[in-house]
Amino acid sequence: MIFNEKLKYSFKANQLGPLSLTALTALLALLALFFLTQASPLMAQDDQPGQDILINKISDEIQSTTGLAITPGLTMLIRGTINNLRAEKGAELPWHSTWKFLLSLGLLLALFLGKDFIPFEPAQKFLMAGETGFMKLLGLLAFVSAVPDLSQSLSPALDSALNSLAPIIQSPIALASSDLTSSDLTSKALATTSEAGFSQLLLRPLASALSTIGGAVIFLAVWLVSNATNVLCLLAPGLAAPIIKGFRLTLVGLLTGLGLAHPFLGFLASLAVILICLMVMGWSFRLFIWGSLFSFDLIFRRWRHIDQEDLSSEGCPGLPAFAGALARKQIKVPKRTLGQLFFKNGQLFFTHKRFLFFKKTVAIQGNLVIGKTITAPILALQKPTGGYGQLFFFRLKQKGHEEYLKKQLRANSIENFGLLKGGLKAWAFIKSLFKSSDNLALELSPPGQA
């Protein structure tokens, strides 16, 4: 029972909104239609070789798109180089396969790879913040180059599968046409359209739309999780970042190896990766938003100058904040959900948009304190059992502006939290040891030498 409740809340906390639910439905429908194409009447049994080529092409494109979404830069560089070397002399190549683009991409990738060998970790983190922004640009370029190819491969299979279902779809239309009056010429003409015309008017555009949407959500779901690993590398200390990147490269190598062994093995492995990415799509999207703002504030040092607005004034949009760990239990908001803190009639509220569209506002009550941390300040709430929990945390640009936050949010005090609190306690303990040794030396020293 407890496990079921946790699973239910975990599914709700991920906020699999319209985009991710559509993606999951489209992916399952894609898998079903993928096998339906083998029994489609438009693909006769005597055309079995052509059918196998189509299935292998779909498997290759899905596996290739998955690998491209995981590591956009490296995969674009390898694919572009192979396409360029295989192309005939004088042939016109797409922009992502030209030597000019490939050389520029290779130099930038080498620059960001070299940052891992810099012994000064703050410089590494600064360059890593720039790398997260660069990877977002590469993700956009990879999306533009990969999704049309995947859509073009999926469209014939979906068109064929939908055509096999055409009689089932046409039956209700034919039944409805028997009740039409003779004056309703437009509806009667639509109802009596031939099967070929029905396919041209409805099924083929529907197959094209489904293939485009399916390709887009497959790429976005995997790329969001890949981007989340870039953010984790930015936060991870020491050797954790190379380990995360090594795991990501290993996964791409595994997908490529299975695809080379047999296209259908690559398809099944890619399908498993895509399903996992869809299940954590809400988490990865929230981490994407937070990581983008964190990198932007770090690169441009936004904490040096911020607009200090009065939250109680009319027209103030509110103070941006991310939901903390305690927010899941206290106000039923998933961690890292971006929203706004504002006052209304003397009461503090937090508002955010569920599924990106539906606005939700919750009241914040209790004893609040502003917490200082190594990175960004937090808004902590006193627990009934004692101690404080992280209710919200702010952007990096709010670092050093704790007094402003205390005044605007009407918090009780400013406290130290996390590693900062532990570090200060350790420093105080070390100072007390030296102070105690000095006092002991004064007590043991002969009179007149103190």
Image (cartoon, grey):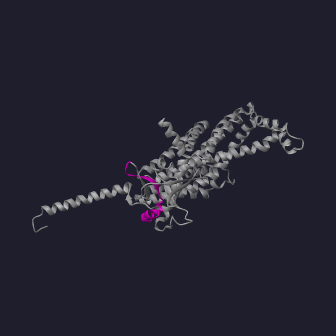
Q: Residue furthest top?
A: 45
**Which residue occupies the foreground of this view, 3 or 191?**
3
Quarter that holds the C terminus: bottom left
With 207 as the anchor, is 250 left or right in this view? Answer: left
With 144 as the anchor, is 443 left or right in this view? Answer: left
Q: How many marks?
A: 0
Q: Residue furthest right?
A: 182
Instruction: Name the residue located 49 percent from the left edge and 40 percent from the top edge.
Output: 6
Res 106 visible: no
Instruction: Name the residue located 51 percent from the left edge and 57 percent from the top edge.
Output: 349
Where is residue 17 shown, x and y percent of the image?
60, 47
Where is residue 328 shown, x and y percent of the image?
48, 48
Instruction: Name the residue located 47 percent from the left edge and 64 percent from the top edge.
Output: 408
With 440 as the anchor, is 19 left or right in this view? Answer: right
Q: Residue furthest front?
A: 345
Where is residue 327 shown, x and y percent of the image?
48, 50
**Which residue occupies the foreground of this view, 201 or 17?**
17
- Magenta span includes 405: yes
Identify whether 419 is placed above or below 253.
below
Range covered by the magenta-colored residues: 385-408
**Which residue occupies the foreground of this view, 13 or 107?**
13
Res 408 visible: yes
